[in-house]
Image: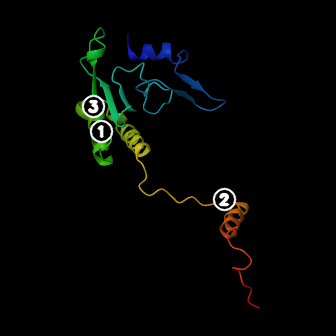
Amino acid sequence: MSADLTWLLVRNWNSFQVKGGHGPVFSKEKGNLLNKSSHKYSGLANSKVVNIYSSPAGGITITKIKADAKPNQVASARSHVALKRSTGPRKAAKIAATETASKGYRADLRPIAVARATTLLRAQCRDANPPRKFFQSRAARRRTAASATEGNTAEDVTDVE
């Protein structure tokens, strides 16, 4: 079955669609890098699909379907590239770009794949110096000031006039 016919059958009736109010229609399917319900980005209708997701171990996994895949051999049709958590952002972007657009696979998805890989890496990073927590209200500042001066007695504090 062709990709166009598959898209015509699947576009309005699939379990991955997320419809909001009056806005755009999104999709949760694997292989859809933008999570946008359209023929170009669909992981169901296209024969060449790239999927970039966060692995449970903390890294990133890039999966794509091989060009010479047979329809009855599903498991061997996919190639996986696992990136460790310690992989730098430039190297991850380079790997995502080459896996997506190498040998004419899907060059139109290159910038989207790079953006998704860098976003996943950025989400997994921990900040070395987290920002200091500040009190949000005057009442909280008064409470800390009062608790700091609770130990002082009247004899310790002298008034100078």
| Residue drawn at (40%, 42%) of the image | 115
Which dot, 2 or 1, sits closer to the camera? 2
Secondary structure under tag 1 reads loop
Query: Which of pointers 2 and 3 lies earlier in the amino acid sequence?
Result: 3
Q: Is 157 placed above or below 131 here?
A: below
Secondary structure under tag 3 reads strand
Query: Which of pointers 2 and 1 lies earlier in the amino acid sequence?
Result: 1
Q: Which numbered tag is attached to residue 84?
A: 1
Q: Residue 10, how many percent across, how many down?
A: 49, 15
Crowd band around label 3 with a 10 angstrom C-alpha radius: few (<14), some (14–19), many (20+)? some
Crowd band around label 2 with a 10 angstrom C-alpha radius: few (<14), some (14–19), many (20+)? few
| Residue drawn at (60%, 61%) of the image | 134
Whether tag 2 and tag 3 are in contact, CB under 8 A, the answer is no
Crowd band around label 1 with a 10 angstrom C-alpha radius: few (<14), some (14–19), many (20+)? some
Which picture quadrant has residue 124?
A: top left
Which picture quadrant has residue 102?
A: top left
Amino acid of disc 1: Lys
Residue position marked by numbered label 2 in the rendering? 136
- Of 24 and 138, which appears nearest the observer? 138
List the single residue furthest toward the bottom: 161
- Of 12 and 14, which appears nearest the observer? 14
Q: Gap between marks 3 and 1, in whole Å?
A: 10 Å
- For the N terminus, give its image quadrant: top left
Secondary structure under tag 2 reads loop
Q: Gap between marks 2 and 1, in whole Å?
A: 39 Å
Residue position marked by numbered label 3 in the rendering? 81
- Of 55 and 12, which appears nearest the observer? 55
Q: Residue 66, how many percent across, how many down?
A: 26, 22
List the single residue furthest toward the front: 155
Amino acid of disc 2: Gln
Tell me if 90 is positioned left or right of 153 in this view: left
Q: Is 54 placed above or below 88 here?
A: above
